[in-house]
Amino acid sequence: MNDNGRIESAGGIEPEVFSPANGYEHAPSLARVRRKISTNIILFIATLFTTIFAGAMLAEVNPVTHPHLLYRGIPFSLTLMGILLSHELGHYLMSRRHNVDATLPYFIPAPTFVGTFGAVIKVNSNVPDRRALLDIGASGPIIGFLFSIPALVIGFELSYPVPDITGGINFGSSILLEVLAGIFFSSIPDGYAINLHPIALAGWIGLLVTMMNLLPVGMMDGGHISYALFGRRHYHISVAVVVVLLVMGIYGWFGWAIWGMLNMAFGLRHPPPTHPHVPLDGRRKLIGAAAAVIFIVTFVPMPFSVV
């Protein structure tokens, strides 16, 4: 990354072409573009497989001993992949709208109980101003949130109460989840818990990803929104958020401390856009406020615990 906050190409030297507006520029070869897209496709297919495998296990199927039942992981996989894809495409399409060079999403397969570490896009050029920064930062979480809600509703319709047992994983709740659970499960007897359908779990993960991305720190989506709204004060907000995460990790869920340390490792400062003095209009301030509300209603103090 250079001093202007631009993420440089990590490859070899590319041929130069002349642009009347910009002078000489690096132009990627057709073979290189195809190779990059091939990487996206390979990672997508790999993540599709790992999430189907994870979804089968969440559906109480052992895909190793019963591979013919692997299809039972498809509902979880397609739901989660759809939510993650909608999130990243929100960033990608908004980047294109503002003439910011961004890659297609890179999915990250993982040997975890959900089968993935999520997806990312890479921005290869400067963001022009704070308006574009807010649009790009807020579009992903807002769209991901909108896709997660119907998944959660459909999944709740397919979920059912079971006798509460010890030794299982308890998925934490938020304001929004408490409201939805009150609607769908208003009369659960004592000693019972909700057995989440894999589609509901995919929706829950989608909301968790949305919430964690909206943390106003560093180069997270929430960090982009914070810088667009508050400018250089973003750094002080990032420091305060990391301190809170570390404290929450000590006295609550340890994952918050890990998340805080990761953000410190990635960096708490945010590069300015090319034209930092272009002010935000009222509509974008409302979008920023909407993102803050989404963060509040989806915040889960204790995402995971063992019961």
Image: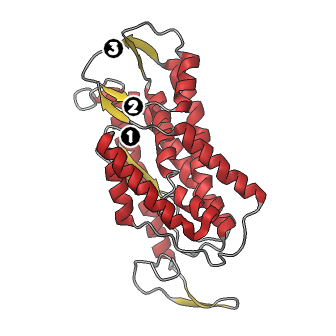
Could you tell me residue 275's position as x and y percent? 66, 78
59 or 165, which is in the foreground?
165
Task: Give the residue at mark 2.
Answer: 73
Element class at badge 3: loop
Q: Is residue 78 above or below residue 92?
A: above
Spatial CA span between label 3 and label 2: 24 Å
Q: Circle 3 sits on which residue?
A: 164
Residue placed most toward the observer, 85 or 258: 258
Label 2 crowd bin: few (<14), some (14–19), many (20+), radius 10 Å = many
Task: Please name the amino acid that badge 3 sits on.
Answer: Asp
Q: Nearer the viewer, residue 201 or 69?
A: 201
Q: Secondary structure at mark 1?
A: helix
User: Which x, y percent locates residue 293?
Assistant: 62, 43
Q: Which mark is residue 174?
A: none
- The three-letter amino acid code for the residue at tag 2 is Gly
Query: Which residue carries the number 1 mark?
Result: 51
